[in-house]
């Protein structure tokens, strides 16, 4: 009888593992059938266990003068009781050898994405698709016109000033990278590794373009921003009426925090939801209401190279007038299982290489259209 109980316990534990495995695989109907078999095994165990317990009780009642405390415990009975209570006394799932090996782990092979904030600066600048590797664009110079000269009757006319022109040249550069993946991973993984990698490569393109654009913006001398009055001066004087109406403030999370603390004389916050679109923000800078666009710190980081000081980018102006991005060839992606890249040989090493290439250039279109501001925050020292 004891041997039978042990066999049933072993079957019950194996069946539990099978039920969990079927559920994890999404085979619900098969899991239900396995659960019914588990119940039958459990019922069979309970019946035999009750019979065994009754026999032991009768034996103890027939002994002379009660229980013999020197009598050996029924190890099978203890094992069965422990098993039915979840092995709480001796076996446990926390220790692998004491039962942990029998407990299936909840492991998902599906790739879960952590939430991140991602923004592309390409939407803020002027983008032009080109078909050659280099070229130029002609612009009329910004000069102050003087008007006509007053002359008397029969007087001699003087020559007026004529428009002057200048050219902006571009030369396309190539940006690229390759990404090796073993064919075993592509074949054996439950996750769609290809889609995940393609998404990753697309995001690499976004980061590349952000860096190129920020690099061009930083070619302009920085303007110190200390207060709301400095922002007003940038809008009213530096940018003036040519760009004021189409300007916005572009900053990062650190800059948003500073803008979000600005108040007027009545203690009212100056950063408010846009009446036209509550999901967007505007800064009430005196008589001017200017949109605010926030770029995550990861995409437009503050400068923290100086200990105790944070230099925050606060770009003010119209970047579509200020920056021009020449796109010769949008991101192209090809794969190969026979290519050679660096020290990697896809054919010999059974790899698939993903190669990404894009070609582009970025230039300052009009440096009068934006202010490259920097806000310096110094940590208070004790």
Image (cartoon, rainbow, N blue to C red):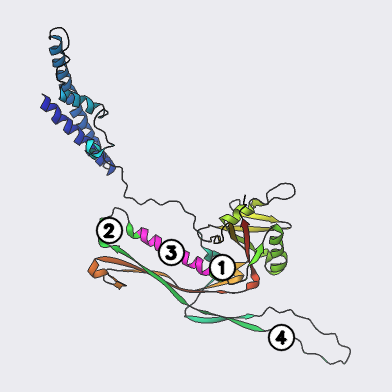
Disc 4 from disc 3: Cα separation: 47 Å
* Picture disc at residue 259: none
The mark lying in front, picked from 4 and 3, is 3
Considering the numbered disc 3 on the image, is that residue within a helix, a strand or a loop? helix
Image coordinates of residue 218 in percent, x first then y, are: 57, 69
Q: Residue at the spot x=59%, y=68% of the render? A: 320
Between the residue at mark 2 and the residue at mark 3, the CA separation in whole angstroms equals 22 Å
- Gap in angstroms between the C-alphas marked 3 and 1: 19 Å
> Mark 3 — residue?
204
- Residue at the far front in the pictured view: 382
Q: Which residue is mark 4?
A: 162
Mark nearer the N terminus (2 vs 3): 2
Instruction: Tell me if label 2 and label 3 are in contact, CB under 8 Å.
Output: no
The span from disc 4 to disc 1 (Cα, nearest Å) is 30 Å
Q: Secondary structure at mark 4?
A: loop
Name the mark on residue 125.
1
* Residue 156 versus residue 221 in the image, above or below: below
**Residue indicated by mark 2:** 185
Q: Residue furthest right?
A: 153
Residue 155 seen by the camera: yes
Residue 328 can be seen, yes or no:
no
What crowding class fits label 3: few (fewer than 14 Cα within 10 Å), some (14-19), or many (20 or more)?
some
Tag 2 secondary structure: helix
Q: Earlier in the sequence, mark 3 or mark 1?
A: 1
Of badges 2 and 1, nearer the viewer stands 2
* Front position among marks 3 and 1: 3
Q: Give percent across and percent down for residue 336.
A: 29, 69
Left or right: 126 in relation to 116: right
Q: Main secondary structure of the magenta part?
A: helix
Q: Residue at x 64, y 55 (%)?
A: 282
What is the secondary structure assignment of the residue under circle 1?
Answer: loop
């Amino acid at each position: 009888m004891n041997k039978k109980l042990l066999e049933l316990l072993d079957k019950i534990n194996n069946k539990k593992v099978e039920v969990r495995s079927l559920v994890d695989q999404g085979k619900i109907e098969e899991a239900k059938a396995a659960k019914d078999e588990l119940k039958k095994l459990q019922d069979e165990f309970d019946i035999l266990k009750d019979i065994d317990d009754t026999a032991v009780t009768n034996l103890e009642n027939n002994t002379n003068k009660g229980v013999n405390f020197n009598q050996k415990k029924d190890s099978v009975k203890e094992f069965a009781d422990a098993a039915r209570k979840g092995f709480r006394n001796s076996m446990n799932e926390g220790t692998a050898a004491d039962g942990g090996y029998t407990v299936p782990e909840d492991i998902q092979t599906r790739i879960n994405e952590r939430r991140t904030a991602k923004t592309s600066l390409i939407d803020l600048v002027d983008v032009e698709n080109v078909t050659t590797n280099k070229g130029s664009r002609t612009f009329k110079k910004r000069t102050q016109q003087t008007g006509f000269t007053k002359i008397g009757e029969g007087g001699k006319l003087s020559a007026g000033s004529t428009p002057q022109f200048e050219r902006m040249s571009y030369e396309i550069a190539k940006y690229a990278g390759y990404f090796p993946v073993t064919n075993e991973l592509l074949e054996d993984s439950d996750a769609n590794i290809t889609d995940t990698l393609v998404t990753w490569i697309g995001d690499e393109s976004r980061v590349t373009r952000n860096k190129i654009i920020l690099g061009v913006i930083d070619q302009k001398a920085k303007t110190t921003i200390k207060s709301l009055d400095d922002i007003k001066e940038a809008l009213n004087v530096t940018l003036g009426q040519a760009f004021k109406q189409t300007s916005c403030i572009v900053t990062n999370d650190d800059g948003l925090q500073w803008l979000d603390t600005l108040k007027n004389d009545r203690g009212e916050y100056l950063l408010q939801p846009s009446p036209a679109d509550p999901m967007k923000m505007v800064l009430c800078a005196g008589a001017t209401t200017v949109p605010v666009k926030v770029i995550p710190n990861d995409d437009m980081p503050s400068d923290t190279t100086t200990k105790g000081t944070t230099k925050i980018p606060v770009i003010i102006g119209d970047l579509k007038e200020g920056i021009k991005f020449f796109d010769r060839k949008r991101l192209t992606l090809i794969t190969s299982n026979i290519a050679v890249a660096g020290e990697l040989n896809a054919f010999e090493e059974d790899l698939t290489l993903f190669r990404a290439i894009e070609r582009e250039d970025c230039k300052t279109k009009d440096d009068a259209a934006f202010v490259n501001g920097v806000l310096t925050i110094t940590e208070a020292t004790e």
